[in-house]
Image (cartoon, grey):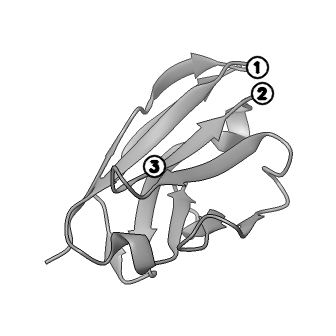
Amino acid sequence: QVQLVESGGGLVQAGGSLRLSCAASGSIFSISTMGWYRQAPGKQRELVAAISSGGGTTNYAGSVKGRFTISRDNAKNTVYLQMNSLKPEDTAVYYCSLRSTYWGQGTQVTVSA
């Protein structure tokens, strides 16, 4: 059984930073691709960033490239999303996903202008 628990969301002013964490239970974390997704009101869920099982390969949505960094600590079964230079358009519920199969409950990120 895989469970994912996100934390670190909140309210921040434009230009600020937040760091999201996603703690995973289960034994397949270290061999799984992990992703961060987001869904804004009235919009479809979109992939923000993904990282390979060993952390050597990452990819980002064009809208966050250069501002967000995904990383992981396999010893802690945790994946992170460092978000810098936040913009109001980054406001959304952020979800982590394991293999695009298992999902966390989401954490709200709100960026004020």
Pick whichever, 8 or 90, lies toward us: 8
Q: Are circles 1 and 2 on residues that touch, CB within 8 Å?
A: yes
Could you tell which of marks 3 and 1 lies nearer the N-terminus? 1
Q: Is residue 19 above or below residue 45?
A: above
Give the residue drawn at x 43%, y 33%.
9
The residues bearing labels 1 and 2 have C-alpha atoms spaced at a distance of 4 Å
Percent of width and height locating residue 39: 52, 58
The residues bearing labels 2 and 3 have C-alpha atoms spaced at a distance of 18 Å
Percent of width and height locating residue 52: 60, 73
- For the question of whether residue 47 can be seen, the reply is no
Residue designated by label 1: 15
Say which element carries label 1. loop
**Which part of the image, by quadrant, shows the C terminus?**
top right
Residue designated by label 2: 85
Give the residue drawn at x 62%, y 67%.
50
- For the question of whether residue 66 can be seen, the reply is yes
Say which element carries label 2. loop
Amino acid residing under circle 3:
Val
The residues bearing labels 3 and 1 have C-alpha atoms spaced at a distance of 18 Å
Number of numbered tags placed on the structure image: 3
Say which element carries label 3. strand
